Amino acid sequence: YRFFSKMQAIRGFSQLNRLRTGTRLTGYCCYYSTNKIVAPPMVFIKGEEMTRHCMELIMQQWVEPHIDTSRWEFYDLSCKARDDTEDQVLRDAVAAGKRIGAIFKEPTITPTEVQKQKMGLRKTWGSPNGAMRRGWNGITISRDTIHIEGMPLGYKRPVLFERHAVGGEYSAGYKTVGKGRLVTLFLPEEGGTPTIVDGRKLNDNASAVVTYDNPLDNVTDLAHHFFKRCLEADVVPYVVTKKTVFKWQEGFWVAMKKVFDEHYREKYLAAGILDRCGGELQHLISDAATMQIIRWTDGGFGMAAHNYDGDMLTDEVAQVHRSPGFITSNLIGKDDDGRLIKEYEASHGTVADMWEAHLRGEETSLNPLGMVEALIGAMNHAAALQGDDTDVVAWTTQLRAHIHKAMVSGLGTRDLCGPTGATTEQFVATIAGALNGEPIIPPEVPAQSSMSILAPDADFGPIVDMFQALDVKGNGYIDLEDFTKGLTRLGVSPRNYGFAGPSTHDKRDEIDPPAPPPA
C-alpha cells in the first residue's frame, strides 16, 4: 500500500493498466487482486490526525484483504499536501468526485493561524468543504441518526435531517467600517436598472458589515430528496425556518411546501404519516426546533433547514443521540446530466486530543462507527452507479453486522463499554478477525452479589423490606404490575405536579410510540 502526497487524477484504462504493472502515477493508490471483490470506481479523500490513523488500520485489516480497490482514486487533503501543491490536490479531488460521483472523505483540518505556524504552512488554507459543495452543485447535507439493535441510544426511532448545502453565513463577505451610509446594490446580469436591496446609516465608530445570499433554485431538489426519504422511513417531516422574523426565509418554506403539496401530500396521507401532525406539512420556528429535538426522544421525525440552522441543530441531535460518532453526514449534489453525486463522511472532526495522546505513546480508544458508515455508504453508492451492487452490498452489510454485534456484545470501544472497552487497535483487530470467520465472543463478566455493590454505609435490612413491599405476588420478581401496586402501597407513586408534565401518549398501550405532535 503506497500513498503519494502530490495528486493527479487517473484517466483512462491504459493508465490503470500501467499502474497494475508497477508504474507510479502521482495521487493514486493501487491494490490489485483477482481473488477479491472488485470495487467500482470511487474517490477516497484522506484527512488528518487520529481519524486518518484509524482509517489506515481499517483499510489494512478490513478492506484490503477482501476488496480490490484498484479502481479507487486516493487524494491527500492533509494541510501539508494542500500546502505543497498550492491546493491543486483539492481541485483534482473535486474534479474526480464530479467525474465518478461517489466519494468517501475522512475528517480534515481547516488550519488556524496557530496551526499554520506549527505546521510551517504558507497560508491558512480555507475549508475544503465549500469548494466541494460548489464543485458538486451541492443540494443538501443529509445527517441521520445511526441505530444499533440491542443498544439503547438517544432516539428510539430514526431522525432524518436535511441541511441546505449552500448559501448563508458560510459564504459571506464582510468588512469592518466606520460611520457613514451603507448601500447594498444589485446589478442584473443581463443589464438594466440596478436595484437597491438595502440602504442604512451607520452611526457606530466600528460596524461589521456582512453580505450573503441564500440560493433558492435547488430547494426544489432538496425538497424531493427530503420528502422521499421521510416517506420511505415512515417519519414525520418538518420544515424549520425563522421566517417570522427573517422575512427573507419565507421563500425556503414556500418552495418546500409547494413540492410537498403537489407531489407527496397524498402519499403521506395514504401512509397515515400526516395523522401524527394534524394532516398537513408542519412548519417549525427554529427556536421551537431546538426544544423539540431534546423532547422528542422517541424519534420518528425529519427536519429540513437552512445551512446555518441545519449545522447547529444537527449538532444538538448528535448530542441527544449520544455523540457525533452516531450521526451520518452525506453531501448530496448533482452533475450536469442530473446524476446524483454523493460524498460520505463522519460528522465529527479529526479527534486531535486523542491524536496527541497517540503521539505520546498512550492508549487510545476511537469509535470508528461514523467513518465506517460513511465508507459503507460511499461503496454502496459507487456500486449502485455501476448497476451491479450485489457483491459489494453483501460485504458491507456483513461488515456493519460484525461491528454492531461486537458493540452489543461488550467488545466496543471505551465510549460504549467504559474503562474495560477496547483500544483503537483492539477493536479493529476484533472486526478483522470476524471478517476472517472468527466468532465474536462476549467477554466474561464476573458475577457480583447484591452485597458487593452496596455503599459501605448502606443498611441492607430496609432494602429487603422495600423489595418485599414491591414484590406483591411474593415470587421473588418485580414486574410492572408489582412495581405500580408497590409504589402505591408505599405512598410514593409519581403525580403530574412537580414533574415536567404527563407523557404525550399512554406507554402502557404503546409498543411503537407515535412520532411527536407538531409544536
Image: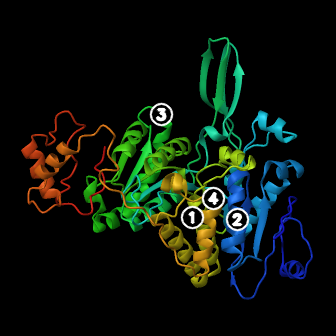
| Residue 270, label in figure | none
Local crowd size for mark 1, using a 10 Å CA cut-off: few (<14), some (14–19), many (≥20): many
Question: Which kind of residue does numbered mark 4 sit on?
Answer: Thr
Q: Are marks 1 and 2 in contact (CB under 8 Å)?
A: no
Counting residues from the start of the chain, the first of labels 3 and 1 encountered is: 3
Image coordinates for residue 296, horizontal then vertical, percent: 34, 48
The quarter of the image holding the C terminus is: top left
Residue indicated by mark 3: 246
- Mark 2: which secondary structure? helix
Residue that extends furthest to the bottom in the rendered view of this protein: 35
- Compared across the picture, whether 491 is left or right of 327 comes to left
Image coordinates for residue 243, horizontal then vertical, percent: 44, 37
Question: Which kind of residue does numbered mark 3 sit on?
Answer: Phe
Local crowd size for mark 3, using a 10 Å CA cut-off: few (<14), some (14–19), many (≥20): few
Image coordinates for residue 279, horizontal then vertical, percent: 27, 56
Counting residues from the start of the chain, the first of labels 1 and 2 encountered is: 2
| Residue 373, label in figure | 1
Depth-wise, is mark 1 or mark 4 nearer the camera? 4
Query: Which residue is found at the position 70% from the left and 65% from the top?
Result: 57
